[in-house]
Image: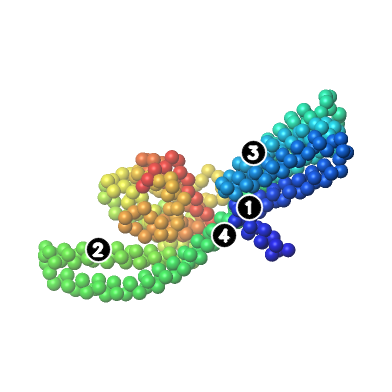
């Protein structure tokens, strides 16, 4: 049976139908079969008016799937068109088979349940309201009570329940797809990381030898010698390559944090000392009453420095760098660090990816600085977020717990009318 199901599902995908669409197809087929039996068992004098209804239903059902085969990807729109037709057919059938006393009012319930599950809560409640109106017009007034009230209440209950179930199922499916995507990405990054680590290790030793040889050569020439200036440029490029290789190794071989109690303001100031200032104005808004945080100071220093360097690079013509620490208004995270710049901002389409390894919009860069910072924060049970406004700059917010956390947290990105950095 599983093989047959897999074959049917495979056929459905080839013609543009998902598993739920196949259920719709099967239901319409079952409805057609039941309608044929209904027509065959009906008294002779009622068969003639029922036959056109059955024929229209058959033609319309076939037309839906033929149109989807010709123009794939429009099945949801076709279902909505079919819903209008189905509601009209059910209304007519209820009308000619006894109105409020007709058992065919159950077809309204079936339509509500199916479409609420397919389209969600809002559509389900809307169809329940439409079915209530049509059912009220299908019989002679006044309707029998309490039967009529119970039936229309059941319409709403079915739409509500099936809609809620559909929303929950959709959220679970989306969460599962995200987890699968993260696993695939992690596998790919692990492979790339292993390759990068091996490559970085093989390159660092030759670079160290080249750097040492250049230093010896440079010591033979006076400071103003053109050859000495050329060697200095080469040394600068070697230093840049070493920094790149260091970032690759940090990403490929993450270190387990060794947490101790740390005063966060002092650690932030220490990281700031390693930042080239240039024309950057530093604004400090540091809360002196913060509790100690349990972190690995060397890892968090690297995370702070990576974010500070990113902010500095966003302001090549100068600007204002604001450092702020505080206790968050609420929540279990005890210390919050905000690093803001007045650069050009980050493009909205780039925000979801800025913490991904190897993603960069810079001409020179590995795309690992922010990825490493985010991972360090997450290793400490914290959260890192980013907000960016067009032409106004970017703010990174790091929230850290005061107590040793359970490993794992999250990285988030939010844009407020963002533009490109």
Inter-mark Cα distance, 4 to 3: 34 Å
User: Mark 4 Cα within 10 Å, few/some/many (few <14, many 20+)?
Assistant: few
Q: Nearer the viewer, residue 261 or 283?
A: 283
Q: Earlier in the sequence, mark 2 or mark 1?
A: 1
Q: Earlier in the sequence, mark 4 or mark 1?
A: 1
Residue at 36%, 47% in the rendered image: 421
Q: Which mark is residue 81?
A: 3
Disc 2 is placed on an element classified as helix
Residue pointed to by mark 2: 236
Circles 3 and 1 in contact, beta carbons < 8 Å: no
Residue at 41%, 56% in the rendered image: 359
Give the side of residue 379 with respect to residue 84, left or right: left
Disc 4 is placed on an element classified as helix
If the image is split into quadrants, where does the N terminus sit? bottom right
Residue at 75%, 37% in the rendered image: 52
Inter-mark Cα distance, 4 to 1: 19 Å
Residue pointed to by mark 1: 18
**Residue farthest toward the right in the current orientation of the protein:** 43
Mark 4 or 1, which is nearer the eye?
Answer: 1
Q: Earlier in the sequence, mark 2 or mark 3?
A: 3
- x and y, in percent, of residue 291 in the image: 49, 52
Residue pointed to by mark 4: 180
Give the side of residue 372 with respect to residue 226, left or right: right
Q: Nearer the viewer, residue 62 or 129?
A: 62
Disc 3 is placed on an element classified as helix
Mark 2 or 3, which is nearer the eye?
Answer: 3
Q: Nearer the viewer, residue 163 or 39?
A: 39
Disc 1 is placed on an element classified as loop
């Amino acid at each position: 049976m599983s093989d047959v199901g897999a074959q049917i599902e495979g056929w459905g995908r080839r013609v543009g139908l998902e598993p739920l669409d196949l259920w719709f197809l099967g239901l319409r087929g079952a409805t057609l079969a039941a309608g044929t039996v209904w027509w065959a068992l009906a008294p002779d004098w009622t068969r003639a008016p029922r036959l056109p209804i059955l024929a229209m239903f058959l033609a319309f059902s076939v037309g839906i799937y033929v149109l989807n085969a010709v123009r794939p990807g429009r099945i949801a729109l076709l279902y909505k068109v079919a819903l209008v037709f189905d509601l009209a057919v059910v209304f007519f059938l209820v009308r000619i088979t006894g109105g409020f006393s007709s058992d065919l009012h159950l077809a309204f319930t079936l339509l509500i349940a199916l479409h609420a599950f397919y389209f969600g809560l809002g559509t389900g409640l809307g169809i329940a309201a439409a079915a209530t109106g049509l059912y009220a017009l299908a019989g002679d007034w006044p309707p029998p009570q309490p039967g009529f009230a119970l039936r229309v209440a059941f319409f709403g209950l079915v739409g509500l329940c099936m809609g809620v179930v559909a929303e929950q199922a959709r959220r679970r499916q989306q969460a599962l797809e995200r987890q699968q995507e993260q696993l695939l990405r992690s596998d790919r990054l692990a492979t790339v990381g292993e390759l990068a680590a091996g490559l970085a290790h093989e390159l660092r030793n030759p670079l160290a030898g080249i750097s040492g040889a250049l230093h010896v050569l440079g010591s033979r020439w006076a400071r103003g010698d053109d050859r000495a200036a050329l060697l200095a440029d080469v040394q600068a490029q070697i230093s840049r390559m070493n920094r790149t290789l260091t970032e690759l190794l940090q990403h490929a071989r993450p270190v387990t944090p060794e947490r101790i109690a740390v005063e966060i303001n002092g650690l932030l100031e220490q990281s700031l000392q390693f930042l080239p200032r240039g024309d950057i104005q530093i604004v400090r808004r540091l809360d002196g009453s913060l509790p100690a945080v349990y972190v690995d100071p060397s890892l968090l220093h690297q995370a702070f420095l990576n974010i500070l360097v990113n902010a500095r690079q966003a302001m090549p013509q100068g600007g204002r760098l604001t450092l702020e620490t505080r206790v968050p208004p609420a929540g279990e995270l005890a210390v919050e660090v905000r690093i803001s710049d007045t650069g050009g901002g980050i493009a909205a389409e780039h925000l979801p990816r800025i913490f991904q390894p190897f993603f960069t919009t810079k001409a020179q860069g590995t795309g690992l600085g922010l990825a490493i910072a985010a991972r360090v924060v997450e290793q400490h049970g914290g959260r890192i977020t980013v907000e960016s406004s067009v032409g106004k700059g970017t703010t990174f917010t790091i929230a850290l717990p005061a107590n040793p956390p359970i490993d794992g947290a999250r990285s988030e990105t939010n844009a407020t009318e963002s533009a490109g950095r």
